[in-house]
Image (spheres, rainbow, N blue to C red):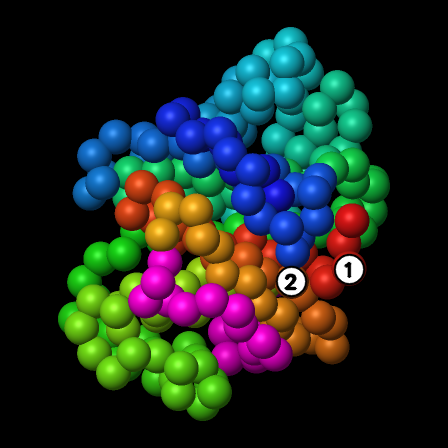
Amino acid sequence: MTTAGAHTARAGYSALGGSVRLFFEPTGAPGVRDGTPTAAFWAPRLAERFGVAAGSVCISGGSGERPCLRVEGEAIAASFSRTAGARVCVVAGTGRPDRADPIGVDAERVVALPELEDVIALSTVEEERRGLPSGGPARLRAFFACWTRKEAVLKAAGCGLRADPRAVRPRRIEGDAEGWNESGPEKGLFFFGGRLYAVETTTLGGVVISAARPAGGA
């Protein structure tokens, strides 16, 4: 997968397939969450990225529905996320009208959570909890990696957080959360709803980002 942004354009992710592109856009102060509607924010930016006329990019859906992105009338699988100080979009090649080529992304800025242990208990399964560092900043960062993976899978599945995050179960994780850097994504496989998903996690500008799509996607 190729990652691009206002200040970043580099090749990276491989597990999700070479057709996957992730766009990272800083939106100002890390403590401020941008409220611009998804279509208004991303349509002109994606038009510029794809080299097409601004009016030829259409984004619909959202608010619990899987988004629909069309570029010059062509359906493209896409997912969007926002967090304090940044917004992320991931696209995955040509889609179909029935949206049978789904992808999901979640982005979270790592911030202190007073209720961290309660959230961990309510959102993770035993094998995930065993893999978390025992405390400190490493535990917090590892949790955000775990959370973004789950939400990315649920978005790819089309249900979002209407489903229990604990229903997303890991099969394999490659990489060490304590060894994260700006060019070293973690890769894993996760089960949800009887389907296997490939997931990759990385950090950009202090934001943890996970992208997911059904395993075997081109």
- Residue 40 versus residue 196: which sits nearer the camera? 196
On the question of residue 181 being in view, the answer is yes
Q: Position of residue 48 (x, y in %)?
A: 56, 16
Q: Residue at x 58, y 67 (%)?
A: 188
Give the number of callouts.
2
Q: Which residue is mark 1?
A: 216
Is residue 179 on the magenta stretch? yes
- Residue 54 versus residue 90: which sits nearer the camera? 90
Is residue 35 on the magenta stretch? no
- Quadrant of the rendering where the N terminus is positioned: top right
Q: Position of residue 163 (x, y in %)?
A: 56, 71
Tag 2–tag 1 contact (CB < 8 Å): yes
Q: Secondary structure at mark 2?
A: strand
Question: Which range of residues does the magenta coloring cover?
Answer: 159-180
Instruction: Judge the density around disc 2: few (<14), some (14-19), many (≥20) Cα neighbours within 10 Å.
Output: many
Q: CA distance from mark 2 to mark 1?
A: 8 Å
Q: Is residue 71 above or below residue 141?
A: above
Q: Which residue is mark 2?
A: 198
The three-letter amino acid code for the residue at tag 2 is: Ala
Instruction: Judge the density around disc 1: few (<14), some (14-19), many (≥20) Cα neighbours within 10 Å.
Output: few
Q: Position of residue 212 (x, y in %)?
A: 60, 57
